[in-house]
Amino acid sequence: MEKIVETILQYAQKLVAEGVTGDKDMISMRSGLNYMYITKAGVKLADLKEEDVQKMLIFKVEKEYLYHAEIYKEREDIHAICQCYPKWVMPVAKAGATIPAVLDDMAQIVGPSCKTAEDDIHYIIKTLKGRNSCLVKNAGCITSGRTLDEAYTCVLVLDKASRCFVASSVIGDNKIINGFEARLMRFIYKTKYSKKNQENLSQKEEGEAKQDTSKKEEGEV
Amino acid sequence: MAWDKETELKLRQVIKDSGVALLKENLVQGTWGNTAVRLDEDHMLVTPTGLDYISLTPEDMPVVQISDPSVWSDGKKPTSERKIHAAIMQARPEINATIHSHPLFCSILASARIELPVMSEEMKRLVGGECRVGAYGLPGTKKLKEGTVKAMEGRNACFMANHGVFCAGKDMEEAFEIIRIMEKSCYEYIKECTLKATGQQTYSDELLFDYFVSQFDERGKKIKIKDKKKK
């Protein structure tokens, strides 16, 4: 089994184990500049098998895979995407609200806020500008990262931040971390704390397959 | 050093097992959170930074000096939160084990910076009263450390604003009981507040979700109470 497929299967299981999936979740990883490996639409992550992870040219995809392909086309810095439906994210996505920096780990890993985009790829790309995650109106969240581990971690952090935001409606408003401190934490996380870790993880996740794929691509193009 | 090798080996295993148990009981996520156990009046074992609790070995735990947490030996690089564990152990000689984590329901109260009232006799016995919130400070700062120490005065647990929870016990078993009761009490508190806000008799997550959604207009903006009354 290719390392990249193995990584996708492994993280699909992790998302299921964490209880942050619904029925239509899809995850993908970029392969080289023009290809992605993506889980088959309509297959639940809990039931995912090796043959359900498909390699596609990002310029030629069916509409079920369009969101992932368009994000990879637009954002070369993105190497992995999780499109998930965590239970506690859903009411925020339904309300169309923006989650402010309610927790330190949200400010660091997701960013100082997370907005809800209309369920349309143009709005999603616009909302993702300068960010790695957004909610989608009535349709869960899209998280991305330099590695699949980073995109996966964003799903967990967003789910926890959503819990805080939703429950604050009955216990009293969230006290939000001030903008300067939230941006400072995000900057330190991106440039120092996680940089080396993400570089190591990137090699681990794509492994030798990264080299194999680039050889294959040369032959295919 | 005033401890024997046998005790150290035993405590290394205690700290390893506590990490695995935190994961199993869903009281910690991934590599986040950290724990410490006292070796003597000026030394403690802590979990290392950035390692997952499953692959961590007892030998990975570094020995940290309580009076100066920048000094450490053995094991791997200690957690950056060691200053808080050290400050609590220094201020409270009766404390021998500490847990810092971000359990899901505790995080809700921490993010709202709301004091948790005594929810049960068990909570009163284990925590020592209501659970306060320490002043907000960026991770690793003096402000966060001092805020946590102050909020822990006369208590065995406190919230760290917008961050998580800190628990301390006479041993790891007790520290564990405290974090468990904290998470359970926070859940009970949220359920109680949901029923009060909605006027319903039976709690469900969906009841809370519907109440939350009703507070926003069609553009995703929160409806002010005045506007809501007009509607």
Image (tube, coloured by chain):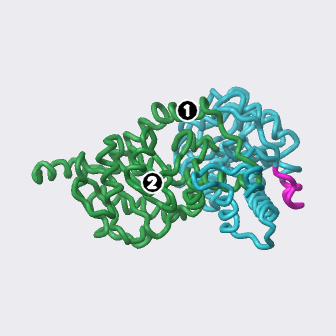
Chain colours: A green, B cyan
Tag 2: amino acid: Ile
Disc 1: CA contacts within 10 A as few (<14), some (14-19) or many (>=20): some
Residue B88: give x, y in percent of width and height: 77, 37
Horizontal and vertical percent for residue A72? 31, 48
Residue displayed at 59% across by 32% down? B73
Q: Which residues are magenta?
A: B116-126
Residue B117 magenta-highlighted:
yes
Q: Which disc is residue A142 wearing? A: 2
Residue A188 appearing in the image: yes
- Which quarter of the rendered picture does the N terminus of chain A lie within? bottom left
Image mark for residue B188: none
- Locate residue A142 relative to residue A54 in the image: left or right: right
Q: Which residue is mark 1?
A: A183
The answer, for residue B10, to whether it is visible in the render is: no
User: Tag 2, which chain?
Assistant: A
Mark 1 or mark 2: which comes first in sequence?
2
- Residue B198 x %, y %: 77, 65
